[in-house]
Image: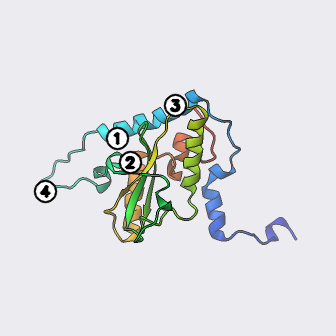
């Protein structure tokens, strides 16, 4: 039997996920120095400040045009909840929502996600929990202040595809470093990739 003839232990979905998540296959990088950690955060925060401060693009048109919904949501203005909110007892499952993981100390938006049940989304396994732990641990190792919280925007569409489109728009707009779409952009050291430049 050749290597090509051997059956895979992984499903096709698992194989596609493995191909997409290059960071999991990277060697663990050396612990960040205090200066490296602060420089990384400041690069991300500077980009996100520019997004916040950029004037809305005005388009000459005879008809009033609404700005894209992603441009109207301010993740930093949402009421923060502790990152362990999901451990609480809730009377209901929650509502369709977008959620934002923010370090309010900087401030920097770390992750954008969507859910159909805001009170249940993080009860199971979620990779972002691991990224947050790694991020907080890196701060604690250098006695640096950190204040990671989650904010929910509870006005998301019940339709999953509509929520995911808005989530993608927000990930592109803010370039949140814990979202896999931006890992290579920021060389995110908290998801398994190496910190570069």
Tell me the SS state at disc 3.
helix
Camera-nearest label, 4 or 2: 2
Question: Closer to the camera, 110 or 139?
Answer: 139
CB within 8 Å, label 4 to label 2: no
Tell me the SS state at disc 4.
loop
Tell me the SS state at disc 2.
helix
Q: Please say whether residue 59 is visible from this viewpoint.
A: yes
**Closer to the N terminus: mark 3 or mark 4?**
3
For label 4, the residue is 63
How many neighbours does mark 3 have within 10 angstroms: few (below 14), some (14-19), or many (20 or more)? some
Q: Looking at the image, which residue is at 57% across and 56% down? A: 127
**Closer to the N terminus: mark 4 or mark 1?**
1
Res 76 → quadrant: top left
CB within 8 Å, label 4 to label 1: no
**Closer to the N terminus: mark 3 or mark 1?**
3
CB within 8 Å, label 3 to label 2: no
Q: CA distance from mark 3 to mark 4?
A: 46 Å
CB within 8 Å, label 1 to label 2: yes
Camera-nearest label, 3 or 4: 3
Image position of 122 (left or right of 116) = right
Asked if 131 appears above or below 117 in the picture, the reply is above
Question: Closer to the camera, 93 or 107?
Answer: 93
Q: CA distance from mark 3 to mark 1?
A: 20 Å
Question: Closer to the camera, 157 or 15?
Answer: 157
Image position of 176 (left or right of 188) = left
Label for residue 38? 3
**Closer to the N terminus: mark 1 or mark 2?**
1
For label 1, the residue is 51
């Amino acid at each position: 039997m050749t290597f090509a003839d051997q059956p895979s232990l992984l499903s096709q979905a698992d194989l596609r996920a493995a191909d997409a998540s290059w960071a999991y296959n990277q060697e663990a990088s050396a612990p960040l120095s205090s200066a490296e950690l602060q420089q990384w955060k400041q690069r991300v925060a500077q980009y996100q400040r520019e997004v916040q401060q950029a004037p809305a693009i005005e388009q000459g048109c005879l008809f009033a045009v609404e700005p894209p919904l992603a441009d109207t949501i301010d993740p930093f203005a949402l009421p923060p909840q502790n990152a362990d909110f999901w451990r609480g007892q809730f009377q209901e499952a929650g509502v369709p929502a977008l959620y934002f993981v923010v370090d309010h100390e900087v401030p920097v938006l770390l992750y954008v996600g969507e859910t159909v049940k805001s009170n249940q989304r993080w009860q199971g396994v979620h990779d972002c929990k691991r990224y947050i732990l790694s991020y907080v641990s890196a701060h604690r190792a250098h006695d640096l202040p950190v204040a990671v919280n989650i904010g929910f925007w509870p006005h998301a569409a019940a339709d999953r595809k509509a929520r995911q489109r808005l989530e993608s728009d927000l990930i592109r707009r803010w370039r949140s470093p814990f979202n896999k779409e931006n890992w290579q952009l920021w060389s995110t050291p908290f998801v398994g990739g190496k910190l570069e430049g």
